[in-house]
Image (cartoon, rainbow, N blue to C red):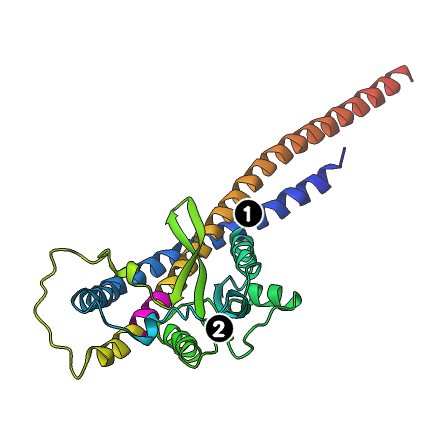
Amino acid sequence: MANIREIQSRINSVRDTMKITNAMYMISSSKMTQAKKKLADTEPYFYGLQGEISRILRHLPELRHRFFDQRAEVPKDERKIGSIVITADKGLAGAYNHNIVKVEEEILSKPGIHKLFVVGELGRHYFAKRGVQIDTNFRYTVQKPTMHRARDISGAIIDQFLDGELDEVYVVYTRMENSVQADAEVMKLLPLERADFNVMKMPLNMYREEIDLYPSAEHVMDRIVPNYVNGMIYGALVEAYASEHNARMMAMKSATDSAESLIKELSIVYNRARQAAITQEITEVCAGARAQQRK
């Protein structure tokens, strides 16, 4: 059995660790709340854009646009597939990063020429070690997602898609379903599919006036679709950011609970060791007293 000083030192060490994990829990809780508020404030605008795209497609079913070009003539083995992979900049978030990496590896196993656009340091280091082609100019952190950063990302992706450098673009991120469940998802960004705009996500009671498409429907789509893609990327960034901190909250809570349980066990061991030391001291005093009486 360890001596009393060693046990006391370990208890103090666990208590210091518990203070850190509890502080990280509180920080992640605050950041997650802020992220969800930012997403809720911007969602109505992008739902409105989705509604207008759906409205145009419904009235002009014969419309053919470059953002909807599926490029079916390109064989599967020659299709250039881009993936925006959103991971964390650091660990201590349970299986958050592992789940994202696992989903992206499934995409990489499919036929095609793959290119990664990684947001987050952990994912960037992971795939760089495995020899996967990564856009080296695409270096973004996941901390504090902003509309400006989403616009930069969407601009780079759209340019490569229109120039033929990419035939398909996906976003791999984590969506937080609730406080205890978050799932890694794959969302197709480009090319857009008409079926995705058949179901309206915006409020049905919103007033809609008649509109004129000037100078043409193609020009209107050229302005609306980039903003819509920007909104999808921004939503994915915020969702991933909130999911990361939710995962970190759960991990830190589990660590804090484990620390409390360990402190209780160590306290029992400490009390036993202290009781044994006291008993030994009493025994030694009594033995000394008896020895003195014999003299």
- 119 within the magenta span: no
Coordinates of residue 51 in the picture (x, y in percent): 20, 64
Q: Residue 18, which numbered label? A: 1
Q: Who is closer to the viewer here, 199 or 251?
A: 199
Single out the mark in the foreground, 1 or 2: 2
Q: Residue at x 59, y 38 (%)?
A: 263
Q: Residue furthest right?
A: 295
Report the magenta residues as a range. Answer: 226-233
Q: Is residue 50 left or right of residue 148?
A: left
The residue that disc 2 covers is 140
* Earlier-in-chain disc, 1 versus 2: 1
| Residue 147: quadrant of the picture | bottom left
| Residue 261: quadrant of the picture | top right
Q: Residue furthest top?
A: 294
Coordinates of residue 124 in the picture (x, y in percent): 57, 68
**How far apart, in angstroms, are the residues tagged by discs 1 and 2?**
32 Å
Quarter containing the N terminus? top right
What residue type is disc 1 on? Met
Task: Establish if 75 lies above or below 271.
Answer: below
Q: Is residue 157 left or right of residue 91?
A: left
Quarter containing the C terminus? top right
